[in-house]
Image (cartoon, helix red, strand yellow):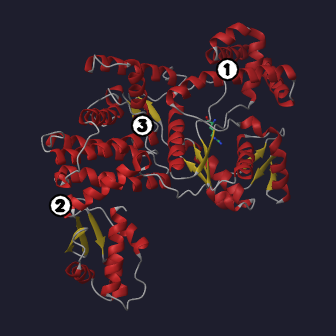
Amino acid sequence: MDMMTRIAELLEKQLSEAWPEAQGLPGAAAIRPLLEVPPDPAMGDYAFPCFRFAKVLRMPPVKIASMLSENWKFEDTARAEAVNGYLNFFLNRVNFATETLHTVLEQGEKYGSSTIGNGKTVCLDYSSINIAKRFHIGHLSTTMIGNSLKRIYDFLGYRTVGINHLGDWGTQFGKMVCAYKKWGTESEVEQGGVSELTRLYVKFHEEAENHPELEDEGRAWFKKIEDGDEEALRIFNWFKELTLKDTARVYDLLGVKFDSYAGESFYNDKMDRVIDELREKNLLTVSEGASIVDLSEDKMPPCIILKKDGATLYATRDLAAAIYRHDTYDFAKCLYVVAYQQDLHFRQIFRVLDKMGYPWAKDCVHVAFGMISFGGETLSTRKGTVVYLEDLLNQAQEKALEIIEQKSPGLENKETVARQVGIGAVVYTDLSNSRIKDIDFRWENALNFDGESGPYVQYTHARCCSLLRKAGDDMPEMDPKALENDEAQALLLLISRFPDVILDAADKYEPSMITRAVTDIAQAYNRFYYEHRILDEDKAGTAARVALTKATRDVIRTGLYLIGIEAPERM
Ligand code: ARG
């Protein structure tokens, strides 16, 4: 059992013994979330604020705290001290160390997991790339936040559905087919992939400046795609395949997977139903020829459902997609991991679903995130400062390899480790701040082995692995007294709080909380490691320090896994 639960149970007991008559005292489950972590460890490991009970108990909080501390009789769990209306707890260090290590080592890779999800389904819409565009670092956050949330929810016992809502619909694809027919060749497109498609698209726009009739031709090709014209569709599907083949390399490097690639075009035949329904429910009005859902009551611009020419829009497709997902997966939650710029779009969509009478509209969440810049420069295709993800990841691997060559020239499989470290450095940077904050990517931070970085955490994990190899498996009974020191205790506290961090991260859709936790754990381990010899003549003490090392390794590995980073055993 974890310490917060234990203390909460003891508090419940003590409260009801001290005030048997009192009505409305909380049970352990309600007490647990009230427990605080004091800002300074000298004030205790946990604190229980007594203020909110003043009313029920008709007594000043200071008095409540002192009464509780005077009668506190669970010294084998924690010592209690009353300070200013708080009851501060100091864990019994030996027991705490024994219990925490027992729990972590017994559960191993499962430590921190849960069945709280109870098989309920969470849909996650992430990455959601656009066809015929190269994957640039603007799509890194959606990909990695979504990937991490998927792993987190899986770990908590949910069934997850990862959806890549492809941007595979729009007039630009007609233009692209048109450009291909005019200036492209099959072999060039096969070879050049998405870059060649981009070249054709740019050429189309250049030519259209002097030949505006091209625009009509482009639109005509798009109409053909929509109408299912065999040639148009064949070319377009081929472009789509090429894009997916190009991005598959990136997804492979990042270890990202999807369960569905149902994108915008998938909803072509699923929108009529939605439009009819909107009409039946009297939600559609015509404004300047377009069909809209008025949202002025909600102080939002209208949600446009059909353009003047009857064409559907991004929003129409998202409405159809939400309904389809609910019908198909019966989700408990549908998360949209999309940049904050689309905030209004999602508020509109969710509001329209709500107006349609879908109670599950409240289960749709826009998980927004900030922008990424590179060395202080915002990225723009126009300015030529766009950074392609595959290039970035390749560079990351090269740079990591250089560092590894220097630091550990004797290492086997350097290439594999360089991949793990290079990619890990990029992913860590992406998930190191609360998601809504903008990120500035800098190599010197990402690959700083001594700073707060992916490589630093990975290195600590490898350090643990190396110590465990040296220690061997043959360990006597451990002496937990070896873990009474401040450094071991600080580390144990972080480890014991790790399961709560995972729950919190899921609750707030915030992978960065896990990044923070593994970084804190790595730092705490290194402090412990520098202050105390892990392996020495004292066999029972060694066994305790080795057990703590093992627990640290397991937790770091799990944490890294949950944010989508591999944990090499040697580096
Ligand atoms: N393809 C879009 C973009 O790159 C993101 C799609 C997000 N998902 C959604 N269901 N609208 O901006």
**Marks 3 and 2 close (CB-CB < 8 Å):** no
Residue under pointer 2: 42
Instruction: Report how far apart the C-alphas of labels 1 and 3 lie in the structure.
Output: 30 Å
> SS at mark 1?
helix
Most foreground residue, 203 or 507: 507
Of circles 3 and 2, the one toward us is 2
Q: Of the two numbered discs 3 and 2 on the same chain, state the one appearing first in sequence.
A: 2
Q: What percent of the width, then of the height, locates residue 173? A: 74, 25
Residue 81 in picture, x, y percent from top left:
19, 73
Inspect the image, locate mark 2, and give the three-letter code of the amino acid beneath it.
Ala
Which is in the foreground here, disc 1 or disc 3?
Answer: 1
Left or right placement of residue 185 versus residue 513 in this view: right
Q: Residue furthest left?
A: 537
Of residues 145 and 406, the one nearer the viewer is 406
Quadrant in the picture for the N terminus: bottom left
Q: Residue at x 25, y 76 (%)?
A: 85
Q: Which residue is mark 3?
A: 439
In terms of image quadrants, where is residue 57?
A: bottom left
**Of marks 2 and 1, which one's residue comes earlier in the chain?**
2
- Find ligand 1 in the image and state its quadrant: top right
Instruction: Identify the secondary structure beneath mark 2.
Output: helix
Q: Secondary structure at mark 3?
A: strand
- Residue under numbered circle 1: 242
Q: Amino acid at mark 3?
A: Ile
Q: Residue at the location (77% across, 50% down)?
A: 292
Q: Relative to 27, say whether 238 is above or below.
A: above
Q: Nearer the viewer, residue 2 or 203?
A: 2
Quarter holding residue 95: bottom left
